[in-house]
């Protein structure tokens, strides 16, 4: 099965595959320092502790090996400042992308550039026909990323439970189809 690169170079930072054996301390610290920033949108952060970080990293390894989820640390100057991932969702030719940043890294274009790099990497795989990004309707910062990258809003749907504390419980779904090959 085709997989994206384990390291993706970006302008000013790198996307690097998370590794369970070496990345616990950095992953735990990143999530811990981002709790308040993430808690309005990501209900899982309320249960964050050392064991949940270990479980997350173990699942990331397992799902990468199975070709189901490709999870990256967004690393700037040697320190993780966020995460992004591509994961299978429904139709095998479509994948969903997700991203979040440490609050100190927000507002610098990092989420947009990281997502753009992941988009290019995923479209390099022959079996990927389209990509989607989903976010809560109230999360306008997350919604700016697909808009900047040329995704099209395709629908709004009820969010799966649990709804984020600051959210509206409505997910906005954006889609980007694989670019057509250049004309000969």
Image (tube, grey):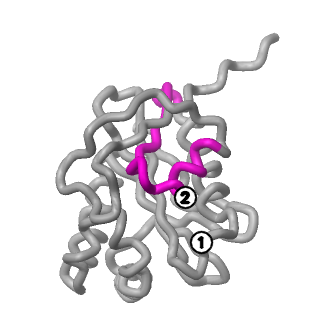
Q: Residues within 10 Å of mark 1 (few under 14, many from 20)?
A: some
First in residue order: circle 1 vs circle 2: 1
Please report the residue visible at 34 percent of the width from the left and 63 percent of the height from the top: 166
| Mark 2 surroundings within 10 Å by alpha-carbon count, few (fewer than 14), some (14 through 19), many (20 or more) | few
Between residues 149 and 128, which one lies in front from this camera angle? Answer: 149
Please indicate whether residue 64 sits to the left or right of residue 144 in the image: left
Q: Residue at x 32, y 43 (%)?
A: 170
Mark 1, mark 2: which one is toward the viewer?
A: 2
- Can you give x and y, in whole percent of width and height, for residue 16 in the image? 53, 66
Q: Which residues are magenta?
A: 126-147
Q: Residue at x 66, y 19 (%)?
A: 180
Asked if residue 145 lies in the magenta stretch, the reply is yes
The secondary element bearing badge 2 is classed as: helix
For disc 1, the marked residue is 106
Q: Are marks 1 and 2 in contact (CB under 8 Å)?
A: yes
Of the 4 image quadrants, the one containing the N terminus is top left
Residue denoted by label 2: 141
């Amino acid at each position: 099965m085709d997989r994206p690169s384990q390291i993706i170079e970006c302008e000013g930072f790198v996307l690097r595959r998370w590794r369970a054996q070496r990345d616990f301390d950095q992953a735990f610290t990143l999530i811990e320092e981002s709790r308040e920033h993430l808690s309005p949108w990501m209900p899982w952060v309320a249960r964050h502790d050392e064991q949940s970080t270990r479980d997350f990293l173990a699942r990331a390894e397992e799902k990468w090996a199975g070709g189901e989820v490709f999870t990256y640390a967004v690393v700037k100057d040697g320190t993780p400042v966020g995460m992004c991932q591509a994961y299978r969702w429904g139709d095998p030719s479509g994948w969903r992308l997700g991203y979040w940043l440490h609050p100190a890294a927000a507002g610098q274009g990092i989420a947009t550039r990281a997502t753009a790099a992941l988009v290019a990497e995923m479209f390099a795989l022959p079996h990927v026909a389209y990509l989607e990004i989903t976010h809560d309707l109230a999360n306008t910062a997350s919604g700016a990323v697909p808009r900047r990258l040329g995704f099209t809003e395709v629908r709004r749907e009820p969010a799966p439970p649990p709804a984020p504390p600051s959210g509206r419980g409505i997910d906005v779904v954006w889609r980007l189809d694989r670019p057509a090959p250049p004309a000969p």
